[in-house]
Image: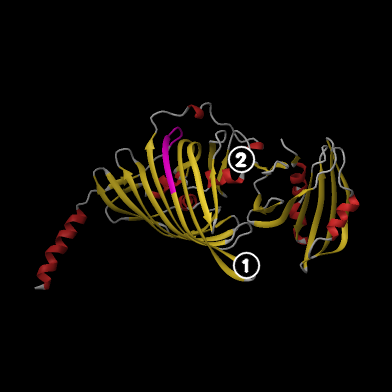
Amino acid sequence: MLARCILPVAALVFSTTSTFAQVHLTETPKPGDTDRFTIELNVSGNLIVLQEGKRQEIKLTARSRHVLAEKTLAVADGMPSRSVRLYEDAAASVLIGSDKDDHSLPTDRRLFVAARTAEGLFCYCPAGPVTREELDLVSEHFDPHCLAGLLPGKAVGLGDTWPISNPAAHAACLFDGLVKHSLTGKLTAQKDGIAEFAITGTAEGIENGAKVNLVIEAAGKFHVESGRVVELVWKQTDDREQGPASPASKLDATVTLKREKLAQEPKEFVPPVAEPTPAATQLRFADPKGRYQFTCPREWHITGQTDEHLVLRLIDHGEFLAQATISAWRKADPGKHTTVEEFKKAIGESPGWKPSRVIEDGEVPLGGGRWLYRLIAEGKLEEQPAIQVFQLLAGPQGDQVAITLTLRPEKVKSLDSRDLHLIKAIELGKK
């Protein structure tokens, strides 16, 4: 009796599967393609930090929304490799514990160029330097470049699966470097000219020097007639270790992407976007109280900020090299500055610092009415071997800041003169 019930059903299933029409899941991007994307992100989870030697979890929630027009400029690996993007809307709100931060793009920083590289997504604004927050807004949302790479590039039937390529996984996961992955696609349904597919699996990579493990479940819709992915819901659990510029975290994230064809190319896309100038690849920072501002290479990451101090870490290809602390210093009369003796006395009161020898001690000529005193010493900081560079920078109107650089002795060669370039870029007083 049981066999008579099952066999007709099995025959029906076999018949349905075998006659299911195959569909060509292929998207062929080319230079000049223009699209409009709406990308929304919701994140929840915990940051994991050590406080007084104990592991603490701090709740994090975040939301972001991006609406952008995109024009493909170049193609590689079957996916756009370089594009120009105009952001109609770009905003993010992050709540960490009870601290809330809201970020958006200013009106003069809405046109960006985005390129897939071996070291991850590289974005720059042709108009000039951006802040770290502005750069994060455009480089840390889901990258539409990967969409064509999520498809098999051939005809498949219901239930058929395919492996996701390394370049597509690299772009979809927003890694700086991909270690390994098991992402697999599967055709799950076809109806009314829409083919539905799923992407599942795990991925491991490096981001900002931290190891990241992802578990991914995604579902997309492919418009058969136009040959384009038009919707994608990408869900991932994100488990990352502590990095040189970020704490460990365990997060759940959901991306909802919708795509439509642009009827008309935005006027901002003409003339063609030029290659980046050195200034366009820099970051900018302005002290909220107007005491100083500067531009610097992207290797400098802000890791702490108070009314009186700004803490930056120099991270080169994921390696932590040095930490710089910029401190507001009392203003002197125009044309004057704190004396070397006074500054040395303050250095001698640095907590936990025990110098053993002086490497360099003297003024550094800058010109333009600016004065820089620099003292480099080797010793121990909190009983650990260290080199500290103490510097006092003064401007012609008496504005002053102190810059303390800390690094391990073996990192001196890698540091080269990048700390001095940072200091020379500091402009004192209101711009």
Callout 1 crowding tier (Cα within 10 Å): few <14, some 14–19, many ≥20: few
Q: In which quarter of the image is the N terminus?
A: bottom left
Specify how the rendered protein is coloured. Answer: secondary structure
Q: Where is residue 181 in the image (x, y as percent from the top left)?
A: 46, 59
| SS label for mark 2 | loop
| SS label for mark 1 | strand
**Is residue 32 shown in magenta?**
yes
Q: Where is residue 187 in the image (x, y as percent from the top left)?
A: 31, 53
Q: Which residue is at the front of the view, 294 or 86?
A: 294
**Is residue 75 shown in magenta?**
no
**Callout 1 amino acid:** Gln
Callout 2 crowding tier (Cα within 10 Å): few <14, some 14–19, many ≥20: many
In the rendered structure, find residue 130 and report the number of the disc placed on it. 2
Q: Position of residue 403 (x, y in %)?
A: 77, 51
Which stretch is magenta?
30-40
**Residue at the bottom extreme?**
1
In the rendered structure, find residue 282 and report the number of the disc placed on it. none
Residues tagged 2 and 1 counted as in contact (Cβ below 8 A): no
Q: In the rendered image of this protein, does residue 112 appear above or below residue 423?
A: above
Question: Does residue 116 show up?
Answer: no
Q: Name the residue under label 1.
A: 51
Mark positioned earlier in the residue sequence (2 or 1):
1
Q: In which quarter of the image is the C terminus?
A: top right
